Amino acid sequence: MEESRRRRAAVAAVAAIWKRVQAVVSGRVALLEQATAALQVGILEEELRREAEQAAHKLAGCLGIFGLEEGSRLALQAEQALRAGAPLAGHQARRLAELVATLRRELEAAQRDSL
Amino acid sequence: MPARRILLIDDEEDIREVVQVVLEMMAGWEVFQARSGREGLNRATIHRPDLILLDVMMPGMDGPATLQALRSEAKTCRIPVVFLTAKAQSADRSRLDQLGVAGVITKPFDFLQLPGQVAGAAGWSI
């Protein structure tokens, strides 16, 4: 009984944290969107690439912890695609843009569900 | 028996919040936070925790470098360390294990399972 109560309290507390961090999470996805837009017109600079890779890395970690496993998986793919020394061909850049768009939709759906 | 004391070293605030809440609420442990390897070294020296949860990938002083620094200090060299590492780096798992840590926990983790994973690595009962 006590363990069950503690679990419920922890779940509620993590849900409250999720509501608080949504703006930060959304900002990280926005950074990925900025990087993929630059990539598609061939002007992705190294600093933005590095920042987007780091944002994807953080998303891969935190989204899974908050139960967004698909979002975490998409973010991990984005991180791998943006890794230094991995130049992206045209079709790969388009694939990355689709992936980030799907990630945005996953996040928006999760945000609606948490309301 | 006094509550177990854990130092959590991770540069990501949302991860730190979740880990602290879950370990304190579900296991009744006391959790201290540090945002960087350098801050973690200072806090480990001050608080002398029973265990350190240490993120691998951090800007500046990363997890392995922080571990090396902890091992070089008399006050902190015996504190068991559990690495937190992203799934993408799990291929380095054997390398991390060889650093002599008590365990490696992969992110993302199921937060409901985290107390059990930490207790298992530390050899504690919950």
Image (spheres, coloured by chain):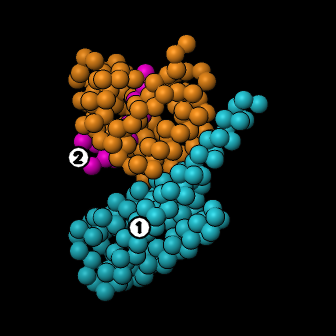
Chain colours: A cyan, B orange
B53 and A8: which is toward the camera: A8
Above or below residue A40? Residue B86 is above
State the separation of the CA atoms marked 2 and 1.
23 Å
Judged from the image, the secondary structure of the residue bearing numbered disc 2 is loop
> Residue B37 occupies which quadrant of the picture?
top left
Residue at 43%, 53% in the rendered image? B88
A112 and B99: which is toward the camera: A112
Q: Picture coordinates of residue B1 (x, y %)?
A: 55, 13
User: Where does the magenta region start and end?
Assistant: B50-62
Subunit under mark 2: B
Residue at 32%, 39% in the rendered image? B63
Q: Which residue is mark 1?
A: A27
Instruction: Say whether residue B37 is left or right of residue A33.
Output: left
Q: Are marks 2 and 1 on the same chain?
A: no
Q: Picture coordinates of residue B116 (x, y %)?
A: 59, 32
Judged from the image, the secondary structure of the residue bearing numbered disc 1 is helix
Tell me if residue B15 is in the magenta stretch. Answer: no
- Of badges 2 and 1, the one in the foreground is 1
Subunit under mark 1: A
Label ID, residue B60: 2
* Residue type, numbered disc 1: Gly
Considering the whole magenta stretch, tell me its main secondary structure: loop
Instruction: Say whether residue A101 is left or right of residue B101.
Output: right
Residue A36 seen in this snapshot:
yes
Give the quarter of the figure containing the C terminus of chain A: bottom right
Q: Picture coordinates of residue B12 (x, y %)?
A: 39, 49
